[in-house]
Image (cartoon, rainbow, N blue to C red):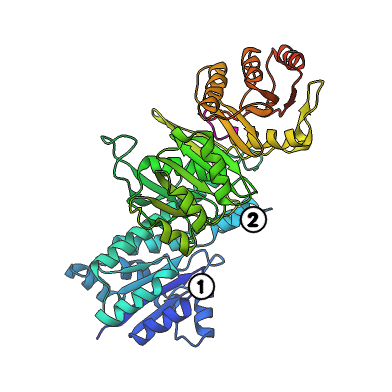
Amino acid sequence: MSVRYALISVSDKTGVVEFARSLTRLGFTILSTGGTARALADHGVAVTEVARITGSPEILDGRVKTLHPAVHAGILARRDVPEHLRALSERAIGLIDVVAVNLYPFEATVAEPGCTLNDAIENIDVGGPAMLRSAAKNHAAVTVVVDPADYRRIAEELQSRGVTSASTRRELAIKAFAHTARYDGAISGYLSSLDAEGNRETFPRVLTRQWVLRQPMRYGENPHQQAAFYVDSDPDAKPVPGLLAGLRQLQGKELSYNNVADADAAWECVRGLLAPACVIVKHANPCGVAVGADARSAYRLAFATDPTSAFGGIIAFNREVTAECASAVSEQFAEVIIAPAFDAAALDALADKANLRLLAVPPGPASNDLDFKRVGGGLLAQTPDIARISRSDLKVVTKRAPNPAELDDLLFAWHVVRYVRSNAIVFARGGATLGIGAGQMSRLDSARIAAIKARDAQLSLAGSAVASDAFFPFRDALDSIVEAGARCVIQPGGSLRDPEVIAAADQHGIAMVLTGMRHFRH
């Protein structure tokens, strides 16, 4: 009986000892290199150094050890081609049936503060990707493993069948090619982000990213469009706390493209509020936002902003949904409810709404590193709009300064307005929105719509605070919001007509503060 070889050479040694023991019990001879060979030997696993089958010791500080015909021929030989097998026999080269390799930690290395170009270069793996690509190419016969999470099932399949199935080998080969593609993309991205002095810039000259299909959508924004939901490729296959990609769907029918887009808008807005909060989103815009003593009271206040638009909306909470909250929400039709968690009683209360989608998203502070927008033949990339404003950042420019309660309302409105499509106007008071004007070509029209929304909801705007996502180009929008009842305004400033707008604010006797920062959202 010919020798069955398994080649193991890993940087991440999680689970590798038990995997090697399992293969040894199944009759495999373990080939290994360097640190992996020592780690296995230290735990009593019989190991054959690769140098023994190549006849060539590691050289160049380990840069060359597996780049040899005795390794790659043993991996690449087709078992169904007699000439291949004869060539191996003539050269006394054994077949390698299992290749377990993961690569030098390049991404982790360059993420470290103080990483030098030399550190990065030394963590570019050469032999590892070559072995993975060889094994993945020949997956008709070779089992290739890049993820320690796959060790157990491979060992179990070998134990029960003697070989891995063709479907398993194909799946693992695809995973290996994706792994090496990500690895090469990370190297390209890092090196092409360095300027002439070796300083790292935000935007590389070559942008290579990898996303993994989470699920196909029933259709896109419209039924005649196809769509799918992809998530950032995570080398640890763990969802990033705080981001929508980490969602678990607990109930309801399949998510749609629009569900996911609106859910992200709602979740991003609500998770930035510290007090118990609720955000209701319709067609990518918040139509109601509020904080309260608990999730239920926050929902009541958010819903009151615009009950008409809230119908069929996406509802997000930053606290666990309880039975009391679920009961309140169930009085209206909603497409999706998002929260960090739902207690058992809440799940029971909503169980009869079979189509209602319940999404649990782990809380956390993470944000995307870059935001993208596809354009014809290209891609726009930018850093995310995550800058925050505190009281100390505000510049009072009117004769009357806002009082502490008004400052609270201004900062709340300022948080909400960043999630409203431009041009955006938000009226708020007491930790709740009162009227939201979104997506108009004129800021004056947004101001008028926000006031109309409040009137339709029978909400008074007297004494309210208003946030504008960008400066007032003319005083007309300011006059409109003051006429509606506003007593204080927060806006970026920066218009040529700032003096005119500030003078108008003083004329009306309201307070105005400038942030020096705008929040366009297109």
Q: Which residue is mark 2?
A: 112
Left/right placement of residue 218 relative to residue 394 reads left
Q: Residue at x 71, y 25 (%)?
A: 487
Residue situated in front as seen by the camera: 237 or 120: 237
Q: Residue at x 50, y 71 (%)?
A: 58
Give coordinates of residue 340: x percent, y percent: 52, 56
- Mark 1 or mark 2, which has the lower sequence index? 1
Residues at marks 1 and 2, CA–CA distance in whole angstroms: 20 Å
Q: Where's the N terminus, which quadrant?
A: bottom left
Q: Is residue 404 above or below residue 33?
A: above
Magenta span: 417-421
Mark 2 nearby-residue class (10 Å; few <14, some 14–19, many ≥20): few
Give coordinates of residue 189: x percent, y percent: 52, 45
Q: Residue at x 64, y 39 (%)?
A: 431
Residue 237 visible in image: no
Give coordinates of residue 370: x percent, y percent: 54, 41
Q: Amino acid at mark 1?
A: Lys
Looking at the rendered structure, which numbered label has been put on residue 472? none
Disc 1 is placed on an element classified as: loop
Q: Is residue 224 above or below residue 336?
A: above
Q: Which residue is mark 1?
A: 13
Residue 333 visible in image: yes
Q: Amino acid at mark 2?
A: Glu
Left/right placement of residue 110 relative to residue 12 reads right
Mark 1 nearby-residue class (10 Å; few <14, some 14–19, many ≥20): some
